[in-house]
Image: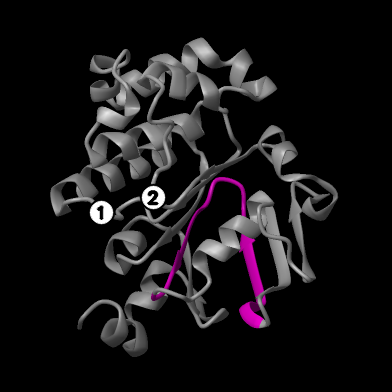
Amino acid sequence: MLRIDQLNVTYGGLQALDGISIDVKAGEFVAVVGPNGAGKTTLFKSISGTVIPWRGTMLFDGVDLATLAAYERPHLGIAHVPEGRKVFSGMTVFENLEMGASTEEGRRRWNDTLDLLFTMFPRLKDRRDQYAGTLSGGEQQMLAIGRGLASAPKLLMLDEPSMGLSPSMTDVIFDAVAKIHKEQGLTILLVEQRVAEALENCDHAYVLETGRVVLQGSLEELSSDDRVRRAYLGL
């Protein structure tokens, strides 16, 4: 579904991504983990089109993403839930979800998707007429994920969904993401600093450090790697 080959991104002369290659197959749950400054968010911004690489290729369902502007990529089936949630605080929960359903597929499936979202996140149903800016951090994260799902995507990209959340709320969010993947068969690309949680449900993972992929493999392979155990799992 998504194939990235030798992607390079530079900010002000500094190399943010250095020859990254990633492959995400349809229906997979793929995690990208690593410390702050590793290039994880830059990778997502490159895929969604808000950052322009200077070298490398990105193919989504065989389409070269370099030929599409950022606003066109959601219509191809790419949903990006950004770091820090970034909900529309002056709009209601329902209006935020409606904004997500701006793609042709999102509009076509809107009624079914809304029922699914309110079943998955009953707090959003209870607060559908409440302004998004008045929600708790966890509720805003639910809303951000719901807004991404409202576009009826083929690929859901989640950037640091645990950021700023309590451990209990983080568990709720990760359980919801795992359920979406399992029950809907949706392809998920997750960027996360909480490595143990990220690896728990993924099919494949990539470890980024200073803009490079330094390790990759299945959950079993990475969990048994001494470098990952020491540096990221605290073992």
Residue 183 visible in the displayed image: no
Q: Is residue 60 magenta?
A: no
Check disc 2 and report the residue beneath it: 84
The picture quadrant where one finds residue 121 is: top left
Visible residue check, residue 201: yes
For mark 1, give the secondary structure. loop
Q: Amino acid at mark 1?
A: Gly
Q: Where does the image place residue 50, in percent across and percent down from the top left?
A: 66, 53
Task: Tell me which residue sits at (59%, 34%) in the image.
Answer: 153
Query: Residue 104 at x, y = what percent?
Result: 69, 21
Percent coordinates x, y for residue 207 in the rendering: 47, 75
Q: Which mark is residue 40?
A: none
User: Is residue 29 magenta-colored?
Assistant: yes
Q: Which residues are magenta?
A: 14-35
Residue corresponding to mark 1: 164
* Dot 2 or dot 1, earlier in sequence: 2
Q: Tell me, yes or no, whether the two marked residues, 2 and 1, touch with CB atoms within 8 Å.
A: yes
In the image, is 98 to the left or to the right of 172? right
Within 10 Å of disc 2 (Cα), the crowding (few <14, some 14-19, many 20+) is some
Provide the secondary structure element on which disc 2 rests: loop
Task: Tell me the crowding category of disc 1: few under 14, some 14 to 19, or many 20 or more residues within 10 angstroms, Cα based.
Answer: few
Residue 143, placed above or below residue 181 = above
Quarter assignment of residue 176: top left
Q: Which color mode does the image show?
A: one colour
Is 15 displayed left or right of 234 in the figure? right
